Amino acid sequence: MTPGAYDAVILAGGAARRLGGVDKPALRVGGRALLDRVLDACRGAGRTVVVGPRRPTVRPVRWAREEPSGGGPVAAVDAGVRQTTAPVVLVLSADLPFLTPETVETLLNGVEGTEGAVLIDSDGREQPLVAAYRAEPLRREIALLATEHGGLGGLPLRLLVSELALARLQHPTASFDCDTWEDITTARARIREHGRVLDEWITAVKAELGIDLDVDTAALLDLARDAAHGVARPAAPLTTFLVGYAAAQKGGGPEALAAATEKAAALAARWAEEQ
């Protein structure tokens, strides 16, 4: 889907009673706030509306509050959708530690030919707050509910989505949300698993430094290995630092980084040959 073809609404309110009333979207998993992780996954949105109390975020967003205050998820979705203009609206909760841009793209593609696409969890349950909806039918259902019930406060989400024609997509990891401290602990442990931790760390570092760059992790690791084995162990971190600095001096970007990595790798190979 082309950039700006969808808007995002993120629900970041709620009392978090099972977490003792803490500010759940601000809880950190892998060193990043849950809300910031979700914001990173939908960074391609034309507009991003966060429904909930204002708080620091990794990128600029629009803020909204449901009417009445504490009125529940349907009222919150309505408050967010009112500030959107795109034909497709991504609706997300703010506690999805494993949501990725790739999953968001899958949801957006799933909207084709239907009124929305929703993820289902490992138990086969629909997750209407990990979904993409066509804006017109979503607004239609909101208006019908408001008329039928005299308002939206306290209404369950199932009433909002039950009449929509939805595609159901299986993705148990991306649909994992954090409702309890046990969930938070599970999420923090999972990102440190072998095969995931390096990608999670690189993503966190890029977010912290404000870098939007595809990193060829394998090439950099090979370079670090060659520098460590062919020169000396301290050469590994120093070499990768210098490669990054050289790439920045050349304007940055994947091409500059790849060129600097290739030159340093060739030097490390020549150095090792002399032994």
Image (cartoon, rainbow, N blue to C red):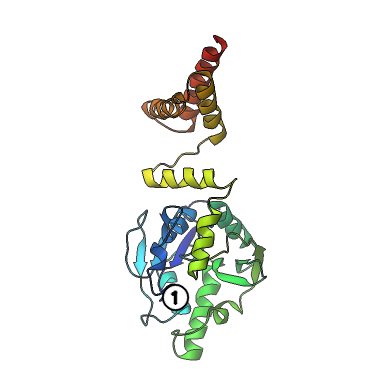
Q: Which residue is mark 1?
A: 78
Q: Quadrant of residue 237?
A: top left
Q: Is residue 52 left or right of residue 190?
A: left
Q: Is residue 263 above or below residue 207?
A: above
Closer to us: 133 or 197: 197
**Is residue 178 visible in the rendered structure shown here?**
no
The residue at the point 56 percent across, 71 percent down is 128
Q: Where does residue 153 sit, x and y in percent of width and height?
A: 43, 85
Q: Quadrant of residue 269?
A: top right
Using a 10 Å C-alpha cutoff, classify the residue at mark 1 as few (fewer than 14 neighbours), some (14 to 19) or many (20 or more).
many
| Kind of residue indicated by mark 1 | Asp
Q: Is residue 50 left or right of residue 137?
A: left
Closer to us: 195 or 73: 195
**Is residue 106 visible in the rendered structure shown here?**
yes
Q: Is residue 224 left or right of residue 173?
A: left
Q: Quadrant of residue 13?
A: bottom left
The residue at the point 42 percent across, 44 percent down is 205
What secondary structure is marked by label 1? helix
Q: Where does residue 72 sit, x and y in percent of width and height?
A: 44, 80
The residue at the point 48 percent across, 45 percent down is 201
Closer to us: 77 or 232: 232
Q: Is residue 16 left or right of residue 162?
A: left
